[in-house]
Amino acid sequence: MQIRTMRWLDRWLGTPLCLALTAIRRLTDAGRRLVGMRPRKDPALSSWHRPPAVLFVKLAEMGSTVLALPAIQRLRRQAPGARLHYLCFAENRSVLDLLPGIDWAGIHTIRTTSILTFACDTVRIIWRLRRLRLDAAIDLEILTRASALLVYLSGAPVRVGFHRFAAEGLNCGDLYTHRLTYNHHLHTAGAFLALVEALAAPPGQVPMLKHPIQPPAGLPPFEPTPAERQALLARLVAGGYPAGTRPPLIILNTNASDLLPLRRWPMEYFLDLAQRCLSDHPDAWIVLTGSPGEAARAAELERNLGAARVINMAGRTTLRELVTLYTLCDLMVTNDSGPVHFASLTRLPTVALFGPETPELYGPLNPAARTVTAGLACSPCIHVFNARESPCRDNQCMKQITVDQVYREVRALLSTRLRAPERGEEATIPPVPPASPPAT
């Protein structure tokens, strides 16, 4: 199912459904008051007398799932033994396996291959969630009608999410018990933390949350197994990389995903950058990465480089293999996309290029990362208030990020060698066996 179709459904089907369920909720509360019954009290975290069952809903965007990790960990500390469930689109399922220290009680997925499949899976998931008897559901989407509906229909008595109150913008009804104002000056990881903190706040706060939130400075590291690292190193060796001397490995990630193609830095800029890296650093190697949909573009870049020190892995790794690759490399230059946040799990020094979106909200939680923007007056033009759909057809915000700007950051990171202490770790990796001699 195309992104445009999903947006159309969210607007034209989601809006009346949200309003209808809001009316039902309010009529139900009014009926309870009419017969002398109090409206249902929304229990706070402190009133739970057993490990709660909590659902997180984050349907799309794998990178934002990584930004939700601190919030999920905070809930784990607040409610030890909590049974955590997660609901997402099927194509985003693999990122959950990368999050360290989280044992999921259940991961629930909705396929988006067609409208019929989407509808059938949605009905099935709602039925399954109601049978779980959830204690709380947290909507990690921001002003999205589909997630608001799923949170409400899950049957959870405590429902946490962002509410527009008197602001203009997307109308998701009034389906949450704990309603927060979306603060577009707060980093997204901090906004997710606020959702979890709202569970322990007095339910009468309007709007939530009335205490400061400090976004985390980093993430716990992803730790691949020695066998996984060895397998990736062997693939690099098969591409000609001299593992014995371990020269610098520079990743160029040209992927920006089909969701927001405006985030792409021009391919000719990547070509110029790669040529400078190979020319000025005679021992450096370039590794090209990207999604399967970007494989053709990466192959064209590889052909144009025509260099022996280039390894193309675009579309040839699983997500877990890709993040394992990050633990072997020294630097990555990437468009604003999921890999920006996946690299934060490995502390890989990263130069992230932002244009239609802003690093103020979506910057990587990685002390070894640097962000570059052109600072145009029209940027960011993609945000939650326009359903992340921009009228722009000429992404000057990316085109005006010069190769000189990016290369200065690359040289600075390579000169400091932020990962130098880790470069001795290859001694713990089993040596790559030499190729067998040809049979005679």
Image (tube, rainbow, N blue to C red):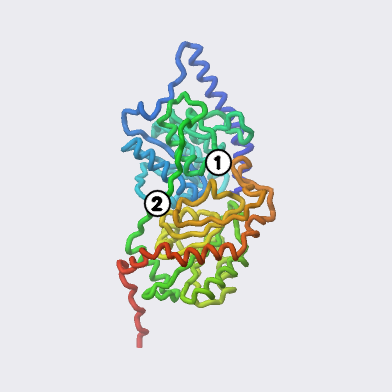
Depth order, front residue of 119/230: 230
Q: Is residue 66 above or below residue 178?
A: below
Upstream in sequence: badge 2 or badge 1:
2
Rendered residue at 54%/50% (across/down): 359
Where does the image place residue 429, in percent across and percent down from the top left?
32, 67
Residue 127: percent from left, percent from top: 45, 35
Residue 97: give its label: 2
Residue 24 x %, y %: 54, 24
Taking the image as shown, residue 379 lies to the left or right of residue 51, namely right
Is residue 436 among what the camera can see? yes
Q: Position of residue 269 (x, y in %)?
A: 61, 66
Task: Return the residue at label 1.
Answer: 185
**Residue drawn where x is 40% and y is 36% of the image:** 54
Q: Is residue 146 left or right of residue 365?
A: right
Q: Quadrant of the C terminus?
A: bottom left
User: Is residue 91 visible from the viewing direction of this image?
Assistant: no
Q: Circle 1 sits in a helix, a strand or a loop, which is it?
A: loop
Say which amino acid is labelled 2.
Answer: Asp
